[in-house]
Image (cartoon, rainbow, N blue to C red):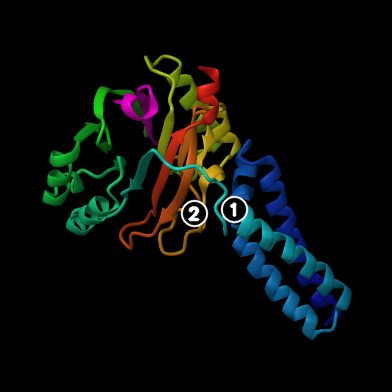
Amino acid sequence: MKIFTTTVFAISMLMLACWGVGQIFSDRWEWSQWLLWIPTVAVLVLLLCTIVLLAIQKRKMYTIVLSLVFDVLLVQLVFVEHRMFANSKCVGQISISGWTMSHSKKVVSKESGEIIVAMDADITLLTHGWYVRGEESVQNWMQSQGRILINGPFTLCTKFQPITVRSLVAADGIYISEFVLDTTAVLGKPLTVWAVDLPSKLSLPRRALSREVVSRMKFAEKNSPDIVLGDFNMTRNSSAIRTMFPALHDAADEGGIGLLATFPMHFPLYHIDHILLSETLQACSYECINPHIGRHRIQFATIAKHPSEGIRK
């Protein structure tokens, strides 16, 4: 029995080590990508089961060590990966929502449209939302308040006057579109929004994908983005995301509250949909909402002009 409990303890520490290596090296390499995707909650469950077993076997030292490790990881999960309390104290000037609709949109199109209208965001990005944008509720909502813009797999419902709509990248499963909106009355300048939809193929290294995106964007006629949002299929603040958008910060880090993960919808383990902001903007709030439809949770954020913008001017 002593050998058994020692083995279980060793397995738990190995899993913990793999998780730690993934957190340190992120998705810089293909092998570390898989370690990064080990869910913290899975490590916690394994540790808890091991602690109970060790306690039953009266392995006091092992139990104490793993209990301390468990507490540290629990703090990591509750206060770093997710947010029990809101960090930001600013008041949002513009509301933004983003929904990756990789589900049977036709079957639940009416219900999806009602959810979108009820959220009533100033800017709503639907990825693969071609059925939903034709719903009567969505059409009536936008006819009275704004415009529906379509480019590639993206549908942007906006209450602001569009200036430019164009595709930046549309090849090999990589889709990036640019929407420039007239937000001068609110932010003092137009807002450049990039919609992103990147491949979900697990065999494709995230690092290689990020380099491919950077390479393709070099040849695209574009404005510097104020907001980049959509389905990245990469975890929050990963090395791959920083490679593509080094100057942007994640809205979840600044204004996040609650369970900050978007996939899978019913039991979200991974935060793979993101809203990234330039230094000119700040996130006043950010949350991931369960629509009870589809596979992804909805991102909803409110943003405002960063206070330093006034100082720079």
Q: Earlier in the sequence, mark 1 or mark 2?
A: 1
Please report the residue visible at 35 percent of the width from the left and 45 percent of the height from the top.
Answer: 97
Please report the residue visible at 44 percent of the width from the left and 35 percent of the height from the top.
Answer: 304
Left or right side of 188 for 260: right
- Residue 189 magenta-drawn? yes
Residues 231 and 186: in front is 186
Q: Is residue 313 above or below residue 298?
A: above
Magenta segment boundaries in residue numbering: 180-198
Asked whether residue 235 is in view, the answer is no
Question: The residue tagged with tag 1: helix, strand or loop?
Answer: helix
Left or right side of 213 for 51: right
Q: Is residue 125 above or below residue 296?
A: above
Question: What percent of the width, then of the height, locates residue 93?
Answer: 39, 38
Q: Residues within 10 Å of mark 1 (few under 14, many from 20)?
A: many
Q: In the rendering, which numbered label is found on residue 261?
A: 2
Please report the residue visible at 53 percent of the width from the left and 46 percent of the height from the top.
Answer: 89
Q: Hey, which quadrant is residue 164 in on the image?
A: top left
Q: Hey, which quadrant is residue 236 in on the image?
A: top right
| Three-letter code, disc 1 | Glu
Residues 163 and 14: in front is 163
Question: What percent of the width, then of the height, locates residue 104?
Answer: 25, 55
Residues 306 and 24: in front is 306
Residue under circle 1? 81
